[in-house]
Structures are given as structure tokens and as C-alpha cells.
Amino acid sequence: MMRKSALSRVLRPAAVLALLAVQPLAVSLRAASLDVAWWRDGKTEVLQLRQGGPAPQPFDGSRQVPLASLWKLFVYIYADDSHVPMPDYRCGGRDPEEVYCCEAGQSVSRDAALAQSCGPFFSPRRLMIAPASWRDYWTRRLGAAPSGELAWLADPAQLTPERLVRLDSLLRALSSIPVASRADAEAALLRVVLDGRGAGTARWFGSQLRVKTYSWHQPTQAGKERERLGGAAGWLADGTPVWFGGAGGSSNVLQQWAPRLAANLPPVQAAEDSGCVVVDYFKRYPISSVRGADGPAAAGPLNGRFQVRFENGKNLALRSAGEMMLQTGGDGRPQLRGRFGVNEYVARVIDREASADEPEAAKALAIAARSYLRQNAQTVAGCQQIADSSATQRVSPSPATPAALAIARWTDQLIVDGVPVRYHTNLPSDGTLAWTEAVRQAKQGKHYDELLAAAYPGGALSTAGNAGVRCKRLAQNEAWLARALPRWQRVLLGEAGYEAPPQPPLVCALASGAPYSEQSRNRIFMRALTTREDRITLAHEYLHLGLRRHPRGQDEDYVERLARRLVDLNLETL
């Protein structure tokens, strides 16, 4: 959770007043509806989710929505696809917008800038984007010069937050970007549900949502108070353009609606498997022969059903559609080698080591298997290469089952970062996911991220293409919190919804951006304690952890008031 007061303190007074004019309604008046739209088969489809209250105004693709900070996504796509240099942005400490970028004297790179919504980084003037080149690029993408409903894409100078655009034109522009051109943006945007505005919502979305968040205000009739609008836009894992918005800031909207939004998004179609994994099969079990329906198999790709006979007398049936290769080793014996995409590989591990019958446990195992591959495979000719062995990971020689493949795709690119990853069938130990224990906990209602947090307490959920957020612990902050908690208990135990975290949270150094709590990992990211406001920040983020299961945990005003009250308790004795 990000702390709004921490943002406002670094803004100039005029900017603070401007923000106050568009502050969201109190969380007690939480958004009663969420508008959702996506683009498929050349048209916009819409959906409205409700949580009581009056029926919302219906909408369709003709709705006017503010571009807000989504303009940064289009600049990123253009610059990345056109090989325009995007040097790191160095924060000088004078621009209030740098609160989304980095601390004064520090720098932010392009992917972090996109996930954090750093506006100064993407300034067309800073990146020296020529209007003519920009227009030519979007003309190629759209098949015609940007005009009419797409005129907002004609000139980078027109990309302003207050610019109103038709919803279907926004989705159509996102649909015009091919998979290769959006790959880098999608990899960067996966951070949003991991450690960005939607931190912790990866529990519901996995890696299926790759969106840029925005917070602005609803267009209203003149003279009426403007309502805060927050949400996100981008793509689903299969490239489906998606947009959603509701009352409040983007962080609150994501936290409030994540479970229902995830359950109501359109089914994600199978996307092309990324990466390349070469598996050397049966390294510990010499093969004597491989036979097909017509007799001994010939060296080369295998197509059809085959019987593998081992020198120990055992047999194994397998199927192959060309992904399995029969070779002759240096000792003259037959050898089998498979070549797969990463998700097919992960799914085959699930089939061989466990099953997909308990989805949350299978998701945890999929992420562990992908992490183990990343940590232990060798890179040969652009592919990760690993042996099929009980000493590494066992991999099914037959195509993955649909259930296992669905789990692998849902967790696509997700890994555990920062610690060695191991797993075992039934023997739990430090840094090891035990499958039987994961199944038991999943049946009790635990989610996959909780299973991973228990198995790898020092790790962080991240992506294979992103180093993720490691925890550099702030011992001073943790010690101060440990001293303060006993004195806070008499107040906290009287607060509705408070549940002390099962273990004291880790307090980690924050490199850039606003402080936040990572509920799935029981961690707080902030800066070292130097002032009273820093102590309030620590108390604020701790309350988000303690109120994680209660609606009041999303009420920023309530949490801030309570945090200040706690810090002022017997301050001199602390």
C-alpha cells in the first residue's frame, strides 16, 4: 500500500492544493462499481462490476475517458520499438513529479520509470522525439494517419493527462501493437501487481495482467465536483487490450476489485510459449532401444507413440510431436533430448513431480520449478539446458496435460528471486517447498503466494525478466518497531479488524518511489528512520499489514490518523 500523505509532503503547496481538489471519496464510500472494457475481434466489449449502491451509468466504446498517465505507455512503446535512446533519468529534487521516480541525486531506468509512472522520464522533449517520426510510426501501426477519433496520437505534444479520448480508440491503439513490440513493456508492467500500485494482487492475477496504472478525475459537467478516477490499461497475457476504472486512486481500485476483476476478465487464450529449454532425458538410466509402431525408431525428431526400453529391463511409453529427438551418444547408446518452451517445460515438471489437482499448490510448484530452472540450467546456444534427473528436476517425456499447462501459463514468467529454490515431495526444510505440505495448506485455503512465502521467507516474488525487489533490511527501523509494538497493543486490540502479523515484518530499504507494504510477504519498504514523519510512515505501513483482512485497511485517512496516534503514545519513552 502506498501512503498518500508521504506523496503530498514532497509536493509544492500549490501542487498539494491541486491534488486536494481531486482527492478520492473516503474509503467508507468505496467505489460501488468498476467499469471494465476490452477489445476483441475488432470491437469493444464492456462489463460493469457492482458492490451495492445505485446502478451505475451504462457505458460503451464511445465513452470519453481521460488519457491520464497512460500517455507514458505510448511514449515507451514508440521509443522502445523505434530504438530511441532512453537514458536513465536523474532526480534533481525540484520537480514534484519526481516523487514517482527517485530520490534527489538518484536515477531511475526506463522499466522502473514505466511501472512507477515517472512522468519526467518520458517527456517527449527529454527523449527528443521528433513529431514527424512519431506520426510516421503510428501511421504504420494504425494503417492510416492518426485522425478523427485517433487524432490524439498524431503529435506527442497532444499526449496530456487531461486529454479526453474515446475508449474504443484507446483500445484500438493498444491492439495495433504487435507482440514483439510490446514485450518489453509487458515485462516492465508485470511489476505493477508484484511491487507497484497493485502490490499483492498477483495472488489473483498471476502474470495475466500487464497494465499501466493511472489516477485522474472523471470528466463531469461544469460546476460539479470532480470525482477521482483510478484504474489501469494495457494487455492481458494473450495480447487482449484491456481498460478499467472506478472511483478512487489506482492503488485503492486495484486492491478493492482485484478478486472480482480477475474472475470476470475474458478467458485468456493460449499465447505463444516464450523461451527455450533443452532437456537431456534419463541421464541416470541408460537406454537400450526406442521403438515405434513400425519398429526401431530412426535417429531424429520423434513423431507418434514410442516405447523406451532401459538396460535395467524397465519400459516407458511416451508421445512426441517432434519436440523429442533421438540421438546416438558417444558410447553408441540411444539418447533422448527434448526441446520446449518454458511453460511447456514447467507443465511437464508439474505432471512428473506432482499434479495440477490442487491449483494453488500447483501454482507454487510451477513458480518453484521455473525458479529452479533459472538458477541451475546452463545456457547453450540461446537455450536453457538441464538434465531430467531426480538430482535436478524430473520432466515428463510426454506432452503436458491441459491442466498443468494452464497453471504454467497462468504463472508465466513468475519466479522466486533472492534465495536458492528447492522443493521435495514430502520433506519440508529451510528454503524448500514440500509438495505434500503445500497441498495440505492449499486445502486449508492458503494461496500460492502464501505457500511460497512460507517456503522461501527470504525471497520475493518477481519475474524472470526482472530482477525483482530484494530486501536490504533496515535494522534500526525493525528495532524501533519491536520496541513500539508492546505499547501499541492496548490501542490496536480495540480497533476493529486488527490482526497482528504472525511474525514481525521485515523492514526493507526503499530505493525509489513512495513507501509501501507487501502484504503477501509481510514486508515494509521505506527509508531509514530520521524524523517523526518516518516513524509515522513505519506505523502507517505496519497498520496496512495488521488490517490486511479488513476494509479499514484500505482507508488511508483512518490508517494515517491511527498511525499518528500510535507514534505519539509515550513518545519520550520510545
Image (tube, helix red, strand yellow):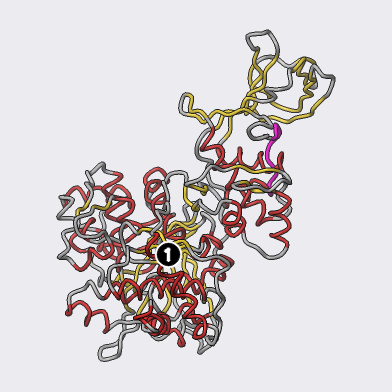
Residue 131, above or below 574: above
Which residue is most to the front?
573
Which residue is most to the bottom?
223
Locate residue 100, reporting x and y percent. Answer: 28, 63
Question: What segment is highlighted magenta in the picture?
Answer: 396-403
Q: Residue at x 15, y 65 (%)?
A: 94
Membership of 153 in magenta stretch: no
Locate residue 546, reporting x and y percent. Answer: 51, 74
Residue 308, above or below 545: above
Q: Is residue 572 left or right of residue 94?
A: right
Q: Is residue 155 visible?
A: no
Residue 376, above or below 43: above
Query: In which quadrant of the rendered image does the C terminus lie?
Result: bottom left
Q: Is residue 228 left or right of residue 365?
A: left
Report the front residue among 571 and 370.
571
Q: Residue at x 30, y 59 (%)?
A: 512
According to the picture, the residue beneath numbered tag 1 turns out to be: 478
Locate residue 247, reporting x and y percent. Answer: 41, 79
Report the front residue among 340 and 204.
204
> Looking at numbered disc 1 in the image, what kind of residue is underneath it?
Glu
Query: In which quadrant of the rendered image does the N terminus lie?
Result: bottom left
Q: Is residue 333 left or right of residue 15?
A: right
Q: What secondary structure is found at the residue carrying circle 1?
A: helix
Chief SS of the magenta region: loop
Residue 487, above or below 325: below
Residue 297 falls in image quadrant: top right
